[in-house]
Image (cartoon, rainbow, N blue to C red):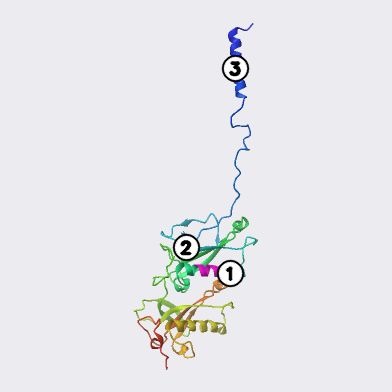
Amino acid sequence: MRSARTTVFAAAVTAVLLAGCAGSGDLDGDLTDDWAALPPATAFTPAAGVCQAADFTDVVTLAAYEPVDCAGPHRLETVHVGAFPVERASAPAGGSAELRGAFTECDTRATGYVGDDWRAGRLRLSVALPSGPGWASGSRWFRCDLTELTTVEAAATVVVRSGSLRDALKGPAGLRLGCQQTRTAAGAGVRTLIPVECAQRHDAEFVGVWRAPEMPYPTRDADWEPLYTGCRSVLGRYVGVPDDVDLRFRSGLVVRPPGAGRWRVGDRGVRCYLWLSDRTVTASLKGTGPAGLPVRTK
């Protein structure tokens, strides 16, 4: 026969066990049904008005996206982010109307960002697209990136700069193209343009940009005539002389279209320079009129 003490102890243990099996407050034994649903995955979109320390690439992955403050050293600045239609199944190919349209939008936004046509400075505008996996996950953006260059002539290299390009071409600036000294080659005309201060003797000057219409890239002599005609009108407005038959006797021209690859993606801005093949000057010819650019008689 069990003692009374044993009976009391057994009753106490049973009570504790029964209490453990009773209600558990807010816990119902189901470890999954009280978690909030995860938000749906969203496609990555880069930001405008930020800079990147890395060099430009025409395809941007999320892993490579590392924006930095534009006040610090960087190689490019994103001035705008646009979007392709959501229903588009794949990224537009080079030379497509869609990609040319994206470049046109970037062109307009970049000009507004820096305060003048970006081609008036030592700048290059490029368009970046999402990677294949990014496109598959829903990304439909295109990114408009500006880069400062050492020169707009051949063999340009990227400048690692500090400070934003916003309003960089409002008024005089070190970035702005101006007076130039030509380097010529026998039988080949002007080979290179070297920037100089306008007070220094020089024989050329940047006069503006002519925007070519939709047309093939110039490869033959006849293809270049529209570019010279367009730049001649730009020159006349810059100096303040009539755009007539005498204009070609006032000054020569140096015409610098973008490269064939850039032309293919929609860049139609042609840089135009006056060229004094017979003399040098020590001041800008902007607005000087016929007195500054007289008709040459020989």
* Disc 1 to disc 2, C-alpha distance: 20 Å
Determine the secondary structure under disc 2: strand
| Amino acid identity at mark 2 | Glu
- Using the image as rendered, state which of residue 221 and residue 120 is in the foreground: 120
- Give the magenta-colored segment's residue range: 100-109
* Disc 3 to disc 2, C-alpha distance: 73 Å
* Disc 1 to disc 3, C-alpha distance: 81 Å
Q: Is residue 96 in view?
A: no
Q: Which residue is mark 2?
A: 77
Determine the secondary structure under disc 1: helix
The structure residue drawn at horizontal position 49% and vertical position 83%, both measured from the top left corner, is: 233
Q: Quadrant of the C terminus?
A: bottom left
The structure residue drawn at horizontal position 58% and vertical position 13%, both measured from the top left corner, is: 9
Q: Nearer the viewer, mark 3 or mark 2?
A: 3
**Relative to residue 118, is residue 287 depicted above or below?**
below
Q: Which residue is mark 3?
A: 13
Do the residues bearing badges 1 and 2 touch, measured as CB atoms within 8 Å?
Answer: no
Q: Which residue is mark 1?
A: 101
Q: Quadrant of the N terminus?
A: top right
